[in-house]
C-alpha cells in the first residue's frame, strides 16, 4: 500500500509454502489498513488465529516484514468433525518504510487476531507550527 506521500509501500507474496514437517501450508496475505496520525502511522493487520507467540516483526533496510502462523484448534474437549473455515497457514507481508519513520520506536501488539503496529514519525517529519514575528 502506498499513500500519496510515499511513506509505506506493500509487497504481496502469495501462494503455498512448505512447512518444516514437509507439508504444504497456505501462505496468507493479511488484509491491512493503514491510518495516519500527526505523530505516527498505525497499521492494522487481520491475522486470525495468530497471537503474540506466533507473530514476528523484523526490519531490515527499511523493509518491515510481518510474519506469523495460525493453526486450527478445536476447543478443549472437542473434536472438529466439519469446518467451512480453512485455517492453518503462514501469514506474511512486507512494507517498505520511508526515512520519515523512526524505526527505533516502533511498537506492536496483537489482540483477538488483529496485529497493531505503531510506526512513529521521526521528529523532522512531524508537522509543526512556525511562529510568525512582526518586523
Image (cartoon, rainbow, N blue to C red):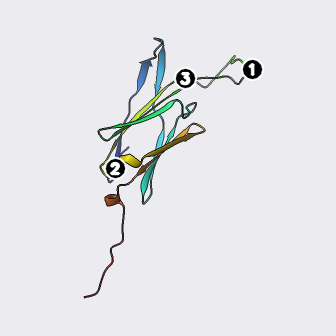
Secondary structure, mark 3, is: loop
Residue furthest bottom in the image: 135
Q: Residue at x 47, y 41 (%)?
A: 32
Q: Residue at x 42, y 46 (%)?
A: 106
- Give the camera-side residue of 17 and 133: 133
Measure how far apart labels 2 and 1 are at the Cα level. Answer: 47 Å
Q: Nearer the viewer, mark 1 or mark 3?
A: 1
Question: Height in image: 3 above or below 87?
Answer: below
Secondary structure, mark 2, is: loop
Within 10 Å of disc 1 (Cα), the crowding (few <14, some 14-19, many 20+) is few
Circle 1 sits on which residue?
77
Circle 2 sits on which residue?
7
Question: Height in image: 41 above or below 22?
Answer: below
Residue 91: x %, y % from top left: 47, 29
Circle 3 sits on which residue?
88
Question: Height in image: 132 above or below 55?
Answer: below
Amino acid at each position: 500500500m502506498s499513500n500519496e506521500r510515499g511513506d509505506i509501500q506493500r509487497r504481496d507474496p502469495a501462494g503455498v509454502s512448505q512447512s518444516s514437517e514437509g507439508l504444504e501450508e497456505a501462505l496468507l496475505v493479511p488484509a491491512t489498513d493503514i491510518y495516519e496520525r500527526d505523530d505516527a502511522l498505525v497499521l492494522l493487520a487481520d491475522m486470525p488465529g495468530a497471537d503474540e507467540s506466533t507473530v514476528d516483526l523484523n526490519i531490515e533496510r527499511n523493509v518491515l516484514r510481518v510474519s506469523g502462523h495460525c493453526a486450527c484448534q478445536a476447543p478443549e474437549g472437542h473434536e472438529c468433525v466439519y469446518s467451512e473455515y480453512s485455517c492453518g497457514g503462514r501469514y506474511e507481508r512486507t512494507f517498505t518504510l520511508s526515512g520519515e519513520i523512526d524505526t527505533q520506536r516502533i511498537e506492536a501488539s496483537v489482540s483477538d487476531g488483529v496485529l497493531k503496529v505503531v510506526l512513529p514519525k521521526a521528529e523532522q517529519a512531524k508537522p509543526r507550527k512556525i511562529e510568525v514575528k512582526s518586523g
